[in-house]
Amino acid sequence: MHRTQARHVTVEEHRESVRRLLSPLRTPDRIERLPILAALGRGLAADIVAPLDLPPFENSQMDGFAIRSADVPDGGGELRVVAPVPAGAAPPELAAGTAAPIMTGAMMPPGADAVVPIEQAVPSLYPAPGVPATVRLPAVPARNFVRDAGSDIRAGEQALGAGTFLGPGQLGLLAALGFTEVPVYRTLRILLVTTGDEVVEPGGPLGAGKIYDSNSTLLESSMRQAGLDVTRTGISTDRPEELAALLRRHAADVDLIVTTGGVSKGAYEVVRQAMEGHDVDFFGVAMQPGGPQGIGTFDGVPVLGFPGNPVSCLVSFEMFLRPALGELFGSPAPRPVVKARLAGALTSPPGKHQVRRGTALPDGTVRLEGGAGSHLVSALAHSNALIQVPEGIAALAEGAEVEVWML
């Protein structure tokens, strides 16, 4: 049976509760192997160990001449030019007193221990007939512009850890190590349900007391951007038996149910009423906006109940669900966190963690967008950041440093 708790939990406590709710979904049967390009944006499901050194052989960092450094005295010297070393070739040993033209990335000839960049070389302009060309080179230390084998990563070292978000850089590393496929977590399937008799689909007639549904678009686009597979049911009525029937129809086909609206303490809170007989808790989180929250299971399927105001449901996703998904499954990537100075003063309610919308500017400041109200969708649309004001801070002056999550 659902429970309504009087106490308020902290943001950190509820974030941990969401992580615990979803952690049973991280099971071996949810792992699949994909071609590396198909794994873009997914989370790595196992540690990857390098099967070879990178680079796999000693090579030149520059276009220039491969030499034995001991062959050139301090004041510079002239060396005989031998056959060039192209990239992809296995060159012969470099004889003493010679210099081999070499391309960037080409294998160093055995015996050579340095590279002189081509810009520092002075070739002989008119070699005598039948006499090999020479080049005058400055003295350079051993290992000059030489990339050692394994200087990037050694065979047997961990290349990527389980839970890593797979972006272009990570996929490039896998390709460089010779991998063609990678183990990743399967995409989570989300059932998204918006509730409320007052809510109508965009484009329909807007009668008295009605508002267009923005929550579904806000959350579905956020979830898809985070790599989730979203099933959207349309708007459920405020009749709890109809909502419960809708959830039962879809529960067997999804990994997580997310509802918006109907989780507060009022008389017409349909989600709370529909959860009668199910292990779901409803309580307040010490956060503004997004205080009312629900969490538990419906027919064994994890459920998160977000509040109904548009900014509240978006902030709930960013503060609770998105971080848990990234921590457990490696996707989505964490929001970049920066420090910025407030471009204007703000106040925050006592005993609550406040999340304000803002625009981070190139000069290192962040400008507040709109007020603290949870209905201000226009302010959200003009924001590129969430400003974090921790519990216990009642006011911050202009110029105060704050933590900012970039959207």
Image (spheres, rainbow, N blue to C red):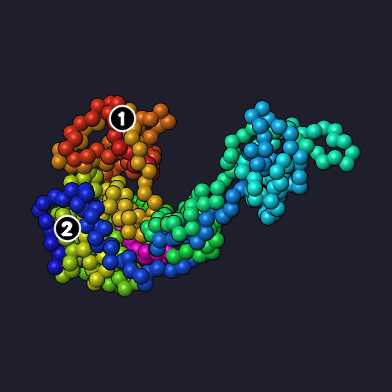
Identify the residue at image location x=51%, y=48%. Answer: 151
Please state which of residues 42 and 246 is positioned toward the viewer in this rendering: 42
Task: Indicate the quadrant containing the N terminus: top left, top right, bottom left or bottom right.
Answer: bottom left
Q: Which residue is mark 2?
A: 282
Residue 9 x %, y %: 16, 50
Front disc: 1 or 2: 1
Identify the residue at image location x=18%, y=54%. Answer: 264
Dot 2 amino acid type: Phe
Indicate yes or no whether the magenta region holds residue 394: no
Q: Is residue 297 visible?
A: yes
Q: Residue 100's quadrant in the figure? A: top right
Task: Classify 343 as above or below 50.
Answer: above
Please state which of residues 102 and 310 is positioned toward the viewer in this rendering: 102
Residue 145 x %, y %: 59, 40
Please state which of residues 347 and 123 is positioned toward the viewer in this rendering: 123
Query: Farthest residue in the top direction?
Result: 398
Categorize mark 1 by other alpha carbons within 10 Å: few (<14), some (14-19), many (20+): many
Q: Residue 216's quadrant in the figure? A: bottom left
The disc at residue 147 is none
* Separation of marks 1 and 2 at Cα, in angstroms: 34 Å
Task: Please tell me whether the stretch drawn in magenta is mainly helix, strand or loop.
Answer: strand
Query: Farthest residue in the right direction?
Result: 129
For the record, the magenta segment spans 184-196
